[in-house]
Amino acid sequence: MADSLRYAETMPPVFTLTAGPVDAYPEVLRALGTTVLYDYDPAFQAFYQEVSRKAQSVMGVDTPPMILQGEPVLGLEAAAASLIAKDDVVLNLASGVYGKGFGYWAARYAKRVEEIEVAYDDCIDPETVRRYLTEHPEIAVVCVCHHDTPSGTINDIDAIGAIVAEAGALLIVDAVSSFGGMPTSPAACKAGVYVTGPNKCLGCPPSLSLVAVSDAAWAKIEANPHAPFASMLSLKDWRHAWKETEAFPFTPSVAEINGLNAALDRYMDEGADRVWARHALTAAACRAGIQAMGLSLWAVREEIASPTTTAVRMPEGVDAAPVMAEARARYGVSLSAGRAETLGRLIRIGHMGPTAQPIYALIAVAALGGALKAQGVDIDLAAGMAAVQIRIDAA
Amino acid sequence: MADSLRYAETMPPVFTLTAGPVDAYPEVLRALGTTVLYDYDPAFQAFYQEVSRKAQSVMGVDTPPMILQGEPVLGLEAAAASLIAKDDVVLNLASGVYGKGFGYWAARYAKRVEEIEVAYDDCIDPETVRRYLTEHPEIAVVCVCHHDTPSGTINDIDAIGAIVAEAGALLIVDAVSSFGGMPTSPAACKAGVYVTGPNKCLGCPPSLSLVAVSDAAWAKIEANPHAPFASMLSLKDWRHAWKETEAFPFTPSVAEINGLNAALDRYMDEGADRVWARHALTAAACRAGIQAMGLSLWAVREEIASPTTTAVRMPEGVDAAPVMAEARARYGVSLSAGRAETLGRLIRIGHMGPTAQPIYALIAVAALGGALKAQGVDIDLAAGMAAVQIRIDAA
Amino acid sequence: MADSLRYAETMPPVFTLTAGPVDAYPEVLRALGTTVLYDYDPAFQAFYQEVSRKAQSVMGVDTPPMILQGEPVLGLEAAAASLIAKDDVVLNLASGVYGKGFGYWAARYAKRVEEIEVAYDDCIDPETVRRYLTEHPEIAVVCVCHHDTPSGTINDIDAIGAIVAEAGALLIVDAVSSFGGMPTSPAACKAGVYVTGPNKCLGCPPSLSLVAVSDAAWAKIEANPHAPFASMLSLKDWRHAWKETEAFPFTPSVAEINGLNAALDRYMDEGADRVWARHALTAAACRAGIQAMGLSLWAVREEIASPTTTAVRMPEGVDAAPVMAEARARYGVSLSAGRAETLGRLIRIGHMGPTAQPIYALIAVAALGGALKAQGVDIDLAAGMAAVQIRIDAA
Amino acid sequence: MADSLRYAETMPPVFTLTAGPVDAYPEVLRALGTTVLYDYDPAFQAFYQEVSRKAQSVMGVDTPPMILQGEPVLGLEAAAASLIAKDDVVLNLASGVYGKGFGYWAARYAKRVEEIEVAYDDCIDPETVRRYLTEHPEIAVVCVCHHDTPSGTINDIDAIGAIVAEAGALLIVDAVSSFGGMPTSPAACKAGVYVTGPNKCLGCPPSLSLVAVSDAAWAKIEANPHAPFASMLSLKDWRHAWKETEAFPFTPSVAEINGLNAALDRYMDEGADRVWARHALTAAACRAGIQAMGLSLWAVREEIASPTTTAVRMPEGVDAAPVMAEARARYGVSLSAGRAETLGRLIRIGHMGPTAQPIYALIAVAALGGALKAQGVDIDLAAGMAAVQIRIDAA
């Protein structure tokens, strides 16, 4: 390809098909530019409550979730800091880089962290969790990552949540990159603390967390003398912030709240079922294409592959970085790298929010396949593209 | 006034003349809606470095400041958590609610916090600081708030900074609501850690902090075993994040970075001197009008009143809340309340970013004066408005 | 005033208080950036019909008005070209530059144009029209400008319209800068062709016309062999374009239609009565201030001054241009010049859409008064500002 | 495909791959929302001149082109009305619906219109024009459409222009949907009047025309007593409007000028050569895919197919409308219908501005092919997609 036709690194790509930050919905981008209101202006107070109520409705919870003013790692760190008390024994479930990472936060606050770890292309067997909890009744908190994004794999949090509830422990769920793109809710997994954010499947830019806390988890947090307060890491500070009568612990990110509002409206207008269905179909078509080309999914079994991200295993001896660079330079398509243990070994295609439309699977397969070909990897690109189309048409 | 002509609480006000969140520049609002890029896309990597360099230039520092991904209370909490070690004795300077509040964070991390406190309508005398430091050579860190926003008063941080430096201690400066609106920089006050944000005088929505750290402060932070890392509260995590070769500790707030870039461009295009001059003139005209109406500044002496906020003392027996509500309902002008000790006792008029234009002083004086009159307070509104105009014209 | 504090001509002003183009509503500005749809896409077809229906509702007509794809001079020229036939005798009513100007278009298409002309600071007496029509039963079309913007004066089109209807002639009304800012509608003035646009009191940028045509006028247009078709100047081409089943004669201005939609929503949400009331009060307060300063309205009697524009007569020997330049340089306030006969002799303050808020009258009076003072004119600025405030508070 | 997965007509499509209105660049969409300035404000006056100069530079002409305030049909109608005098004999070149249509305008103003017409899938042979002009030396004006969009075919206007110039006639060129997407300029085709617009390959919404007029054409226009003036159709009115010293004949479309400015900046930043190359490659890849599927181009020979639109001939017995509807419902891809003679018989894929990126060819081929398959047409979709990819990679 002539150099003059390649996309320069300084130009934005044509498509951003990543696992986050993701392409935002145009409605959201426009809403970000709404006139900034004073946080104590009555119009903003009413608006904030309204947005909180919409988030409550979308998450299916009894009181509005907290909208923490930082991307979901804030929600996760705050969850660990708030819920885990000094004498708690915690069970961390690690099936990927993010789940593993949460254990480090847990260890900061807990007496002891136990861990069930599986290979990062696999997922946690709920029965193992059941056995573990039976054998270790002292465990107070269990932590699980729903969609371990760096692996593109899904844990069965509803099954795990039922087991944890039965054992009388509290579950912290990282549902950051699954919520809004597939059927999942705090209630369905009986979560103690359920952390997600608008910056993945809801199609917003990163900068806010959504955190739902159960009554039992609130009781534990309020009883925890070390739970942060008067701090960015505090859940307690924000518990009642959605009420018009309550002060904000600090200034909310007004523009991002405007964006969130647009995203929630859009989600409810389209309908959760339809949104989930197009995420699922986009991912299914993408997987069909990847496999038909002769590539493998990173996930050890297709049924644990996420409907919101497809992680593609690099063939033996192929480094992901130059392939990603080639996809971008040649087709203008930006894809996601792995992280830590998965870095270099896989490439991720995000199906989140505005890019969770089946036709995007074709772009992704074409760009990834074409880049691999250009790097000398022998794949059947035509078969891949055909398989995408067939899968879409079979829906 | 007929009810039908009053501004409903559900309608946004006509003017937001608050001390924060402030009205944002239109350039910034438009920039927030820029296409969201993947944080590891080369175009974003180059862009982030470019924005960091602009922030460096605007702040007059040797390396890019850290752009923390939360409004400046994050920067302040992170500064306390990072710089103050367990065996440090800290001197906190409190001339207002924000300065006082920082002491609580300091106390969380220090062995002991000493405090020089003055009335919240006054400011810290640098000579008192000198004497204190001479008498207490064990003090390692001094904390000061430049513009204590809830009081609208300014501390002489350049004089204080020189004294602190001489004493061999490190200074933490809260310059959140002064930087960008008046002459101040990390170098001028010899700050160890200088915290500000784009959400005040730079005219952005709240959601980011800008933190400059001196070499000496970095040495202290790196030596502090309890300085946060792998945490939202960490300065260390972000130290090198501006470099293209470095990973982000977590996902940056892409949209807000786009907004910051526009704000920095605008600031440099207009020129810092002109920006500061219009902040100063707006405040001076506002103070002239307030006093000519027969009202008093909150500041005990006019020379310590901030060029970025005018705090107006409520007359004896007058509560601020209904006055603010009246200004909004009658004229569509949203003003700021006080905070904690100053709540109810003063009303604040912000002069920050886009509202730091002299003609806005007239709107503020008219709305505040008219609301007071409507509440039965005897003031000379015509004299107030005339004084504003005369002050502007004398510039 | 120090040069460094004056607003450079290259910088945008702080306030645009003009009679058009006017400051647009923020909702409209954001809507302009909506994703562009193909005009024959079913989503756009449905949307265009919906916008047409909203315009119909706001204008109070039986079928959707035509949305012509050019600012309202297009609507006016098209009205003349379409309605006026070669053998028509036309009566043109001229009380200002725009009314006078319409006569030139009329003359292009008519057999003969008669004219009733009054001084450009006065308005047409409906009884004169009645007498004229009685004496000249051959007159087929009467043309009137509701708000002759270059003079800031209002003709009583409802009275005139009743007389014209009685005489069996058809009325062409230019309601460009009155509609949406005061009580006026095609029905109220029994208009044959009623031309307005979203770019004045509805708060949009200039680029569209709204044209309502009565059944009788349609009959005349369809019978006119020279009425334009297949032309930018055609009304006929667009008659049915709002229907989903009909093709567009040429491509609609998609972005501007998006803006119009937002403007109509905003207007209906606030309610026409409230919108009109704030236009009226803003203008009344402005006039009170102007006169209290010792200046005169351009309008020979206050009751004919427009609620959407205040035209201020320059004192003897004072040229408007340097005064306007001074208001802009000194206060950042952009005001409107006169046109043709009124150029240089008056300055206009627009009260349209977002600037039709009473507090803006204060800004306008202060800026205009201050500029005159700076130019050496002896006025009582303090009295002017006080009068504005008193008038607002008396509402 | 399950109904719930199909795209409803009320939802906007995922991709708009049409020949106009086209998807606009995000920079343009954001620029449309820029604060509206008064047209006589000095900042707008300077800005308008600057935009005019950029347009001049991009079009490669000696003085700024006129920016007419309506989509390019206005420019075309104005060109006919202005240049063609009552005693002119005009030669109209018709190779498609648009070229043919121009003849009707020409006939309105000319003494007589001669026409060379070819099949609407073919193009005009310059040698035929030469012979015609030799035989008809009385011809004063020749009219040609560069890219007859409803056919997706290109006339060789540079060759035709040279012949017309040699014959001493003046050429009116419709370069609306070619300019900015391929090498073409007023100078290269020796145009008398060259009409284009920002709403096609420059990636703006429709609402402005760009018209360049040669000195000879100006002389003819100025000498034409019937050339419109004081009219929307006038070229003369706008001749000098770009100069700061000149008044605007009527109010410019401020928001659209802001959009145009962003589009011109973007075009110059990327570089015309690169922009043209990606238009060419996108179209080439699209044609390769179409043909490999077993479909035919509408163009009788591939070398006359436009680099900015690919028109695909429907197979015998297949109506375009349900195919387009299927592509939209199934894949969310909006395609363009034909017009008049080509309506129903072809489907058009636009490659203009933001969609002139090679990877879009794949989307278009997949959506069109998939829709045809769903309608029971036997095509080899896999071969089509493979051919697209191969063509891109061969670049």
Image (cartoon, coloured by chain):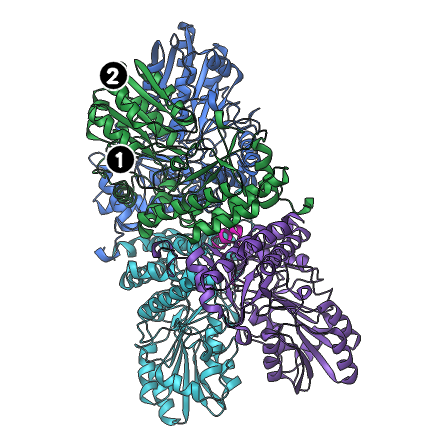
Chain colours: A purple, B cyan, C blue, D green
- Estimate the x, y position of residue B185 in percent, counting from the top left: 32, 73
Which kind of residue does numbered mark 2 sit on? Glu
Q: Is residue B318 visible?
A: no
Q: Main secondary structure of the magenta part?
A: loop
Q: Nearer the viewer, residue A132 or D37?
A: A132
Give the vertical position of A218 relative to D312 (above or below).
below
Give the secondary structure at mark 1: loop
- Tell me the CA gap for discs 1 and 2: 26 Å
Q: Which mark is residue D186?
A: 1
The residue depicted at 23 percent of the width and 23 percent of the height is: D169
Magenta region: A19-37
Q: Please tell me how crowded label 2 is: few (under 14), some (14-19), or many (20+) other residues with Cα within 10 Å.
A: few
Q: Please tell me how crowded label 1 is: few (under 14), some (14-19), or many (20+) other residues with Cα within 10 Å.
A: many
Q: Are marks 1 and 2 on the same chain?
A: yes
Give the vertical position of C177 relative to A303 (above or below).
above
Give the secondary structure at mark 2: helix
- Estimate the x, y position of residue C227 in percent, counting from the top left: 42, 16
Q: Which mark is residue D135?
A: 2
Q: Nearer the viewer, residue A343 or D32?
A: A343
Q: Chain of mark 2?
A: D
Give the vertical position of C381 relative to B65 (above or below).
above
Q: Which mark is residue B236?
A: none
Which corner quadrant of the image does residue A182 belong to? bottom right
Q: Nearer the viewer, mark 1 or mark 2?
A: 2
Which kind of residue does numbered mark 1 sit on? Pro
Q: Chain of mark 1?
A: D
Magenta run includes residue A26:
yes
Give the vertical position of C7 relative to B296 (above or below).
above
- Estimate the x, y position of residue B332 in percent, counting from the top left: 48, 50
Q: Is residue A203 visible?
A: yes
